[in-house]
Amino acid sequence: MSDPNQAVAGRLGRKEFITLVAALIAINAFAIDIMLPGLQMIGESLGEADPNRRQLVIPAYMLGFGVLQLVFGPLADRFGRRKPMLLGLAIYAVAALSAFAVTDFHSLIILRFLQGAGAAASAVIAVAVVRDTFVGDQMAKVLSLIFMVMMVSPIIAPSLGQALLTIMDWRGLFGFMAGFGGLVAIWVWYRLPETLKPEDRRPFTFGAIVEGFGIVFGNRVSLSYIMATALLFGALMGFLASSQQIYVEHYGVGHWFPAFFAAGGICAAVGGFLNAQAVTRYGMRWLSHRALVAFGLLSVIALLLGLAQALPLYVFFILMCALFVSFNFIMSNFGALAMMPLGAVAGTAASTQGFLQMVIGASLGAVIGQFYDGTTVPLMAGFVVLTLLSGLVIFFGVGKATVTEGGAAPATPTHM
């Protein structure tokens, strides 16, 4: 698979495949990050004065995104990858366009839930498509490259959002999201083949769906990695919910906020690139477990400095960049380790991973955001607590178990 022009799915070469799947996942990143510069304008326009409540535009999207994955996963295992994906993209685009008719904040929250519900198809099925096409460390490498390409969105999305807000009101952000979703749908329609083999399709019945979820929840190692990613995703959601207030209100960076946010995206992309280069040499488990330890130590340092009121902007920024690098080493490898034993129910497995990640992550992120008190302490305390919980899940759930294509050996607790 070293030739980038070699077809890996229908007519798609490796580069186009990675870029298309990254675009499918980036739809969700754009739907979150492009909103950040507009939260204040949205609140003022729709009569929501509480800045913490304005944050709900983000977790509302995440909640819909997480819940509907439980539907799109089994649908993708029954009807293939293409049709459910195109249906979800259509729902996403229509919900985004409907924002032009919104006159109150609560209606916008409902539309954001529906928009996230449609986007659930693109994310869960994108992961299933990767699982259909690659296995083992190659799957982790491809996921890392996908995340690296995907991180272009947080690099440019806040700046793009800021630019759009200079020429139109906040509804223009939703117009952009609808247009981007439509373009990706056209790309999928013409270029992405069906990757689920006919003989691998599962019936869409209550019994078959329950059986599929039973396979996922019955694999202790896979479930442990899924739960660990969900907890860590809560840390990322906490940052997304609080980042605008921390950078603008606490540190006073003003219009430079998109630049700081973009720099974090660059760091995350660097982490994805480095992981893609290292994973085939050192393995997913070795890299991700050590990255989790590094993430925890960096979080503790940032928390202690914040408590001591000795965390200036440049130190906070450096620590966040290092955290983003280690975060990408964790998430892509944990995701691949979770999916590896579950190829027979890839859609259901991806939906379970996405559901728990988004619902738990969005909920925890919303809680962290509501604790914002004008300092970095609540955010970094959330990072420390969630990293500790994630480490405990891996410690007791994975231990020395060896993850294989066919399943995982019984787990024995051990140090990471």
Image (tube, grey):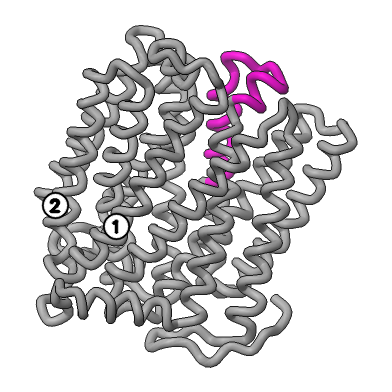
Q: Residue furthest top?
A: 167
In three-dimensional space, the C-alpha distance between marks 1 and 2, rounded to whole angstroms, equals 14 Å
Whether residue 14 is visible, yes or no, is no
Would residue 177 be counted in the magenta stretch?
no
Seen at 42% across and 87% down, the residue is: 407
Say which residue appears at 34% left-offset and 19% top-offset.
104
Q: Is residue 134 above or below residue 67?
A: below
Report which residue position mark 1 lands on.
Answer: 126
Residue drawn at 31 percent across, 18 percent down: 171
Pick the residue in front: 10 or 207. Answer: 207
Please give the residue where the numbered disc 2 appears in the rendered image: 191
Left or right of 224? Residue 400 is: right
Which residue is located at x 60 percent, y 36 percent? 369
Secondary element type, mark 2: helix
Instruction: Tell us which disc is closer to us: 1 or 2.
Output: 1
Q: Looking at the rendering, which quadrant does residue 106 occupy?
A: top left
Q: Give the quadrant of the C terminus.
A: bottom right
> Residue 209's spot in the image, x, y percent?
24, 74
Please state the horizontal and vertical placement of residue 174, each as a whole percent of the image.
Answer: 29, 25
Q: Name the dominant secondary structure of the magenta segment.
A: helix
Where residue 357 appears, as percent x and y from the top left, is: 46, 57
Q: Give the residue type at disc 2.
A: Arg
Q: Which residues are magenta?
A: 245-268
Q: Is residue 157 above or below residue 49?
A: below
Q: Label 1 amino acid?
A: Ala
Count of marks, rendered view: 2
Q: Give the structural element (helix, strand or loop) at label 1.
A: helix
Q: Position of residue 242 (x, y in %)?
A: 60, 32
Tell me, yes or no, if residue 221 can be seen here: yes
